[in-house]
């Protein structure tokens, strides 16, 4: 397994590396980065990563913009945020930006391994006590959608309105299909709707 480990504290990276070396079965390669710029550079170097363990708050870039940048650089990598913040809003924004998991830094080492296992299987993982903020429904205004959706999610929402499948959206936006699936899940959660049809209806209502 090839892991990108990004955190601005070297001591924390060393601790996580030791945990991975002790808990992961099979070959393991860990590439470290101290900020989002280094993380994106490592991803663009040409080698594929299975999992990214990324701190939310690092120097040089807003954390949520950084997550989006990482996802653009490696759309097929499974991304898990490891953060000291347990804010429900931060958890939701991280997931909406493209993360597939969110681990509080106070979690146990076994929780980290479980997160890796779950995201590799296509599921979303949150530390047990974490909560995810939901967007309030104030009538579905355009401003609301702009506040709760990332630019890429608004692109996906517009295509949902056109009735396109995940495969078609992935082709048109040059994304991996699993990334589109994650965006759709985030859109439904952020807009407070239950399915693609409801999302499409809301998109039509607000003019997307």
Image (tube, rainbow, N blue to C red):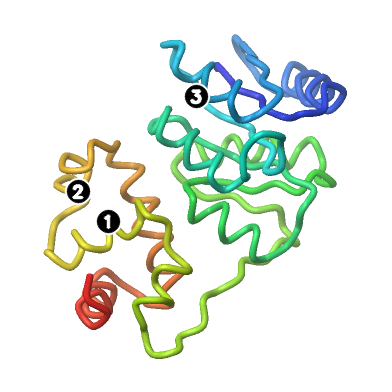
The N terminus: image quadrant? top right
Answer yes or no: do the residues labelled 2 and 1 have beta carbons within 8 Å?
yes
Q: Which tag is nearer the camera, tag 3 or tag 1?
A: 1
Which x, y percent locates residue 33? 67, 20
Q: Residue at position x 76%, y 19% from top?
A: 17
The residue at which mark 2 appears reads as: 169
- The relative height of residue 109 versus residue 194 in the rendered view (above or below) is above
Instruction: Judge the density around disc 1: few (<14), some (14-19), many (≥20) Cα neighbours within 10 Å.
Output: many
Q: Name above or below for residue 176 compared with residue 4.
A: below
Q: Position of residue 173 (x, y in %)?
A: 22, 42
Residue 50's label in the rendered image is 3
Q: Quadrant of residue 201?
A: bottom left
Q: Splitting the image into 4 quarters, where does residue 91 fall?
A: bottom right
Q: Kindly identify which residue carries mark 1.
A: 156
Name the residue at 39% across, 33% down. Answer: 75
Q: Say which label, 3 or 1, has the lower sequence index.
A: 3
CA gap, disc 3 and disc 1 = 24 Å
The kind of secondary structure element at disc 3 is loop
Q: Element under label 1? A: helix
Q: Position of residue 192 (x, y in %)?
A: 43, 77
Which sits earlier in the primary sequence, circle 2 or circle 1? 1
**Label 2 to label 3: alpha-carbon separation:** 23 Å
* Dots 2, 3 in contact, CB < 8 A: no
Circles 3 and 1: CB distance less than 8 Å? no
Residue at the spot 27% in from the left edge and 56% down from the top edge: 156
Mark pair 2, 1: CA separation:
7 Å
Q: Residue at x 82, y 21 (%)?
A: 10
Q: Secondary structure at mark 2?
A: helix
């Amino acid at each position: 397994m090839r892991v990108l480990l990004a955190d601005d504290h070297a001591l924390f990276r060393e601790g996580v590396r030791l945990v991975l070396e002790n808990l992961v079965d099979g070959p393991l390669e860990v590439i470290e980065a101290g900020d989002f710029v280094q993380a994106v550079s490592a991803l663009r170097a040409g080698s594929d990563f299975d999992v990214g363990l990324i701190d939310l708050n690092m120097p040089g870039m807003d954390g949520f913009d950084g997550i989006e940048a990482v996802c653009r650089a490696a759309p097929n990598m499974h991304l898990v945020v490891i953060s000291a913040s347990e804010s429900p809003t931060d958890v939701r924004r991280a997931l909406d930006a493209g993360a597939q998991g969110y681990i509080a830094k106070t979690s146990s080492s076994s929780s980290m391994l479980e997160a890796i296992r779950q995201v590799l299987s296509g599921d979303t993982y949150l530390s047990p006590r974490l909560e995810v903020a939901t967007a309030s429904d104030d009538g579905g205004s355009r401003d609301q959608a702009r506040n709760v959706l990332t630019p890429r999610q608004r692109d996906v929402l517009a295509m949902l309105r056109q009735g396109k499948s995940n495969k078609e959206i992935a082709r048109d936006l040059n994304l991996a299909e699993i990334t589109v699936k994650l965006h759709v899940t985030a859109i439904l959660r952020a807009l407070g709707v239950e399915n693609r049809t409801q999302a499409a209806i809301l998109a039509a209502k607000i003019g997307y």
